[in-house]
Amino acid sequence: MRSDNRIPNIRPMSSSPCGCENYWFNRCARYVMESVNEPDYDYNFFSGLTGDIFAQVYAYGKFRGDGALEYRIGNFGSDTLNRDCIEDVFQTCGYESKVVLRKDLLKNREVHLQNLRSSIDKGIPVIEFGYGCDGPPWGLLVGYEDSGNNLLLITGGKADPWRVPIETALASNWVFVGQKNEQKELRQLYRDIIFNLPKLLTTKTDAYCFGAEAFRAWAADIENGRFDGMKPEEFDGWGMHKCYVANLATNAHCNSNCGHNFLAKAQELNPDFTFLDAIRAQYRKMHVLWMEQPGENLEALGGGFNITLETLQDKPKREKITAKIREFADCADGIVQVLKKDLPSD
């Protein structure tokens, strides 16, 4: 039995030179699919399949993550995560997978460590998520040393893996991707994702909401005084506001790693989806509202990545910001209206 091994062709998690691959799970899933020679299952594909690249998100209360998939998974620190929503992603691609939560890793560590070594020996990395490895919430275990007492981790923008003691890695959750059971038709996969968009973009639970409702709930919380009386040390700029700006900016941005690219591929595979042009137009409008309206875009109003607690506590300033956020909601409504009107009946 080998004491040391690593997968071939280790590279950074992101292949985007402009840093626009902002949804971590989709980077990891693409990396795994590359290792089994499935180039069609790329970052853009997974971003559409998970809904991350299409859905504005908003949490009622505390920060829940950076996109739709993380919202559905639940609190990474919990032992009751929704494993199905990850396993369903790989099942959709025709592959077996298994999510092992940290409590189960600790309970049966030797079994799962052997499974990890077996996966690495086959050239397939193991996804880890949570905060056990003292880094970003998602990473890839790409090798082992000293019979598994130390593991090799890729995360962030690092080109080289770093050594993580097994005890540290066991504090995360692991995702094993196994054998392929079915060859899926790419055209139908893209088609199914588009057909699911109306449901995705109208999701609402007791804990969070997506789509137009997410924009309106965000605006309402600001407007109704969520930040009134808040002390500077209580203000989490990222978790309370900027994460939602990042969500809309990523999804609307006109670059190669966003919804525009997915929609173009979907239309290429499904020429009858001419209505996707109208949906792209709504996302382009969101991009304009975010940063291209001279003097009137969200950033210019102080409601974007430049947000401050003082601005959120200033009623005249925040009224302009919430009015702008509601314009994004109108775009999201427009997307659902197009889908309900023009989706074929199949």
Image (spheres, rainbow, N blue to C red):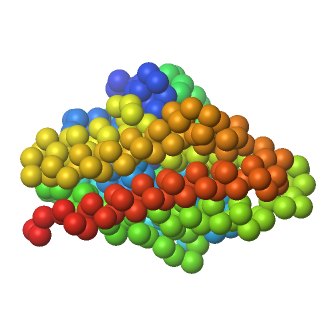
Closer-to-camera residue (116/316) = 316
**Residue found at the far bottom of this picture:** 206
Residue 140 spot, x, y in % from top left = 47, 39
Q: Does residue 172 appear in this view?
A: no
Residue drawn 39% across and 46% down? 283
Closer-to-camera residue (142/224) = 224
Closer-to-camera residue (267/168) = 267
Residue 217 spot, x, y in % from top left = 59, 66
| Rendered image quadrant of residue 264 | top left
Closer-to-camera residue (183/189) = 189
Residue 181 spot, x, y in % from top left = 17, 57
Residue drawn 66% across and 51% down? 321
| Rendered image quadrant of residue 285 | top left
| Rendered image quadrant of residue 219 | bottom right
Residue drawn 89% across and 61% down? 229
Q: Does residue 242 appear in this view?
A: yes
Figure disc tally? 0
Residue drawn 50% across and 67% down? 213
